[in-house]
Amino acid sequence: MDKFYITTPIYYVNGKPHIGHAYTTVVADVLARWRAAQGMEVVFSTGVDENSQKTVDAAKKEGEEIQPYLDRMAEIWEAAWRKLGISNTDFMRTTEDRHLETVREFWKRMDAAGDLYRGKYEGLYCKGHESFLKEDELTPEGLCPDHATKPEFVSEENYYFRLSRYQKPLMDLYAAHGDFVAPARRFSEVKSFVENGLEDVSFSREGREWGIPVPDDPHQSIYVWADALVSYATGAGGIEGWEEHPADIHAVGKDILRFHAVIWPAMLMSAGLPLPGQIIANGFLTAGGVKMGKSLGNAVDPLALAERYGADALRYFLLRETPYGEDGDFSEEKLRERYNGDLANGLGNFAARVLALAEKEELAPAETDDGFGQAIAEMRRAAAEKTGEFRFGDALAAVWKAIAFGDRYINEKKVWEIKDPAERRRALSNLAALLEGAAETLDPFLPSTSAKIKEAFIRDGAVLRARKIPALFPRIA
């Protein structure tokens, strides 16, 4: 059986999940479920970053000891993904022993390659990114453009990674693998950044009270990105597991793309390890044109939305509303419009009509005509093609096109008025086949809804029977 390994970032635990985290994780879940449906063995790793300074600051703010705080927050994040129907096979916590061992081994490999050295660093440090920024990366007001906070000036002696050594190897990688980063627009940004020259980067911090100590130097802690990125190797089963099968896809947000498309492959080259297959980056979800985030105080709680509209409705909105890779402006009004228009009046209404008409019939769904066989085949083909291109909205549009075809058929044929048993059976068999096909195609996107539709059909040999089910998406005023 072929294997497919996909990851999300490991998320900071200085707060609860917001809708931006949900977006990235839902995208990874769609791809994981899609590959599983193709018969692949899927490893899907997500988790939380517990070794950052943000962790220490958040625990202090809450008046808790660090470890109890981490345990409480990890459970919140795990529960959130369960509620959103995320099918991860692993939940990574960077305080686990398996991760500590992988990070230490990785560090020693980079050190043996001559890529780590001690040096003094002075620069502007952004707590939001846990990264140093250059002055030309700041706004005219001297703020981080993503977090709207003023970086602090830091001067300390750290270990450095010789990132500058890997400028040409990275450019060679990008030239050889034209889809290493997707969408293409994001790849262009990465290549432009590397072409302009790379500087060595700080890989440790001194005197930190939390984190993984540098091997043989307990006064230094391994810096968050040199630790967090290695979690992907931990999720593969450690260094040997990564060597056997590196990640096929890293799903990230565009704000951390450089770490994944520049620093991470350079680290892997240094450690003598294989590279990931692809890095895909979603855009920001904004509110009134401003990026959402915990540090900006405008984060939206995805669980509250899922409670109000259902997890599948939220998944649908995130995937359908904004082309992948682009920024999208979120509002609950837009979500409600999609819910009532596409889900309640679209899929939900079509399913209710078909199941009500077919409830007392004996159907033969393999017998399709009147263009239904072609419509179903085209729906499946287009959805698969667009999903493979990360055009999730277009994949869903292919399903809704088939649903619209089915609705027109019901109305034009006036199926509810058909008296002839053979003709009625044929019409309803067509519609049942389309509804079942839509459910199967939607499984990676709307897993709960797909399961409900499938459960409405009962097979008895070659005969298919349908039963009415509660409304999939009751209208919301």
Image: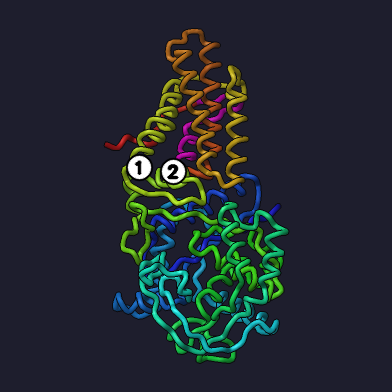
Q: Is residue 219 magenta?
A: no
- Please give the residue where the numbered disc 2 appears in the rendered image: 321
> Which of the 4 image quarters holds residue 151?
bottom left
Q: Are marks 1 and 2 in contact (CB under 8 Å)?
A: yes
Furthest residue to the top?
A: 420
Name which residue lies at 73% across and 59% down.
Answer: 176
342 relative position to 304: left or right: right
Name which residue lies at 45% across and 38% down.
Answer: 452
As drawn, 408 above or below 73: above
Q: CA distance from mark 1 to mark 2?
A: 9 Å
Q: Secondary structure under badge 1?
A: helix
Which scheme is used to colour this image of the protein? rainbow
Name which residue lies at 52% across and 33% down.
Answer: 399
Looking at the rendering, the stretch of residues picked out in magenta corresponds to: 449-465
Q: Residues within 10 Å of mark 2 (few under 14, many from 20)?
A: some
**Callout 1 amino acid:** Lys
